[in-house]
Image: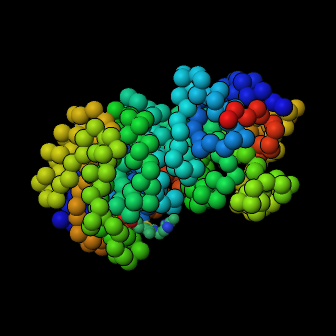
Amino acid sequence: MKGIEAFKELAPLLKNEPTVLANGYISREFFNVTDRKENFYMIGSMGLASSIGLGVALAQPQRKTLILDGDGNVLMAMGTLAMIASCAPKNLIHIVIDNEVYESTGKQRTLSHHIQLEEVAKSVGYKQALRVTRPEEIQPAYKKLYQAEGPVFLLIKVEPAFDSSQGRVTHTPEEIRDRFMESVAG
Amino acid sequence: MLSSKTFIEQLQGSGFNFFTGVPCSLLSGLIAELEADASLGYIPSVREDAGVGLCAGAYMGGKLPVLLMQNSGLGYSLNAFTSLNLIYKIPVLVIMSWRGCGGKDAPEHVIMGEINEQLLQTSGMEYAVLDESNSEQVLATALQKINVEKVPYTLLVKKGLFDERH
Ligand SMILES: Cc1ncc(C[n+]2csc(CCOP(=O)(O)OP(=O)(O)O)c2C)c(N)n1
Ligand SMILES: [Mg+2]
């Protein structure tokens, strides 16, 4: 499965959940599949999508909050998994697009071929952690986790297949913040 | 000496309502006060940059966050400040201990102590040095920077300002 296929499965399931997206191709590709004001496209600060998402989830405990993360991003900030588990926001769903590479910088390998990130999440104390490898598994897994008490973790294994002719996020950082904050407050 | 309890009350009085950090002995009194009141919900961060991310999310979710760190954590956080807070205009109040100030400290603190102010200045991070008589005034400036200019604001804390509890 390609990353874009995973995004096309996920996109129709999203309602108004604040969604924090990791930098690089993850933000870019999801922007091209479905641009919504609830998307916080993190263009720098690699590794921090998870802590930003945790902050949103804690500030807005009644809103389901999503993190769309990458394997390289998660490995850079593995300690944040422990913070998420210990703060235990019931409303947080952490989704990882795991292509086993830093695709955005030229497909250099990460460590996630050997390290099962969903096992790491489980062992630090996420309430549930699932791994899916086929597109048809995504919707049932997402729906199951959506019903469950968080924090929960969904690892989606994909092949590195980003189409680099796809455009970049066209909103400025301040526009991204303003839209996101309005959607969270509204 | 500035009482940790009084300063926390001033922070709360200014509207700050989300607290996280990575400890420094110079801030141990402050953190003890924060931890003593469960309603303040102090969250231990694993690294300073994770604390920056956490505060950014909390701010966008409607909170007014405070991040406590040692100045060694400024090194870990610079990319977060420059590629997140300063470009998206996401404010946070940073309370940063100034280890190595004046060159008298353990070897690992000397260089950062010397370049601390310059590093903040070159990075475009505005700051004030907190002392025992200016807390109300610097908090007023911090609120102006945070609410109007929407930039991070740092308060540098020298050794001896707050009581240490360790
Ligand atoms: C601190 C830092 N180091 C390196 C980079 C360069 N960089 C940008 S995206 C990226 C890869 C992200 O990897 P992953 O989370 O797996 O997402 P993917 O690119 O595979 O979609 C890297 C290394 C950066 N932006 N910031
Ligand atoms: Mg990757």
- Dividing the image into four quarters, tell me where ligand 1 lies: bottom left
Q: How is the image coloured?
A: rainbow
Quadrant occupied by the C terminus of chain A: top left
Left or right, A145 with reference to B74: left
Residue at x 72% of width, y 24% of height: B5
Left or right, A133 with reference to B76: left
Residue lying furthest left in this view?
A136
Q: Nearer the viewer, residue B33 or A68?
A: B33
Q: Nearer the viewer, residue B122 or A183?
A: B122
Count of numbered tags: 0
Can residue A186 be seen in this snapshot?
no
Q: Quadrant of residue B107 in the image?
A: bottom right
Residue at x 39% of width, y 47% of height: A81
Q: Nearer the viewer, residue A172 or B63?
A: B63
Left or right, A7 with reference to B92: left
Q: Quadrant of residue B115 in the image?
A: bottom right
Residue at x 30% of width, y 45% of height: A123
What is the x, y in percent for residue A45?
52, 59
What is the x, y in percent for residue B6?
75, 24
What is the x, y in percent for residue B64?
60, 34
Q: Quadrant of residue B124 in the image?
A: bottom right
Q: Nearer the viewer, residue A95 or B32?
A: B32
Examine the rendered structure and indicate whether residue B104 appears above or below residue B131.
below
Quadrant occupied by the N terminus of chain A: bottom left
Can residue A88 be seen in this snapshot?
yes
What is the x, y in percent for residue A140?
14, 45
Residue at x 84% of width, y 37% of height: B131
